[in-house]
Amino acid sequence: MSEAYIHESSYVDDDVIIGDDTKVWHFCHIQKGARIGSRCSLGQNVNVGNNVHIGNGVRIQNNVSVYEGVEIQDNVFCGPSCVFTNVTTPRAHFPVHGIYAKTVVKEGASLGANSTIVCGHNVGRSALIAAGAVVTHDVPDYALMAGVPARRIGWVCECGQRLGQSLRCSCGRQYKLVSNEVLEKTNEC
């Protein structure tokens, strides 16, 4: 393993931890108290807010701000210009002073370009949020979400492929529907 790479145009505040083999590219700002895991990539113009925790193997594309109150678990993909919020009723003249709604993006999830995750809602394990979708409620594991507001339009495998009615992926993974909104993996490849 090698140390993190931080481009000379980026700013890293005090009390920040960045894991081995992580790359922080041009014009990024990593704010105080942030914790970023190993093998991550932060594209151009990424802002990581105070006290944000980002897991291992995370890919954050260009022009994404991860605000305080957001947690990103391992192996998450954040597409270009995807948006996180952290205050449910923002007002310039009534600041919240550090009281933020919590949002968790769980392991293996992917957020498409220009998607928006409204704060206080979690994105399930290996879920796939389509480009431009606006998430306004919790997203189940393996859900394929699209639209404004985002609605579940199907299910996806851990590998990212859309699942058909058999809920068996071409990669060999098999799933079962536990309820209308709960999908479980039944085998491992």
Image (cartoon, rainbow, N blue to C red):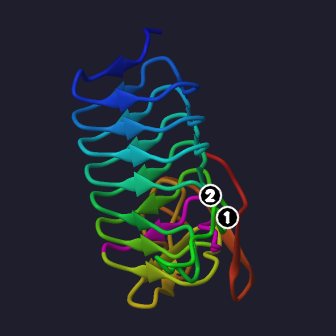
In the picture of the structure, the residue carrying the numbered disc 2 is 69
Q: Residues within 10 Å of mark 2 (few under 14, many from 20)?
A: many
Q: Amino acid at mark 1?
A: Lys
Determine if the magenta segment contains residue 121.
Answer: yes
At 52% from the left edge and 22% from the top edge, which residue is drawn?
19
* Tag 1 residue: 102
First reached walking from the N terminus: tag 2 or tag 1: 2
Place residue 111 in its image quadrant: bottom left
Residue lying furthest front in this view? 93
Residue 144 spot, x, y in % from top left: 48, 76
Please determine whether, in this image, residue 186 is positioned above or below residue 178. Answer: above
Taking the spot 54% from the left edge, 56% from the top edge, the residue there is: 158
Residue 91 in the image: x percent, y percent? 50, 81
For the residues bearing labels 2 and 1, Cβ distance under 8 angstroms: yes
Q: Which residues are magenta?
A: 120-131
Quadrant where the image shows the C terminus: top right
Amino acid carrying label 2: it is: Gly
Furthest toward the top, the residue is: 2
Please say whether residue 171 is visible from this viewpoint. Answer: yes
Seen from the viewer's position, the closer of residues 69 and 32 is 32
Where is residue 2 shown, x and y percent of the image?
Answer: 43, 9
Find numbered disc 1 in the image and state the secondary structure of the residue it sits on: loop
Q: Is residue 118 above or below residue 48?
A: below
The picture quadrant where one finds residue 51 is top right
What secondary structure predominates along the stretch shown in magenta?
Answer: loop
Residue ID at (58%, 25%) = 15
Residue 42 magenta: no
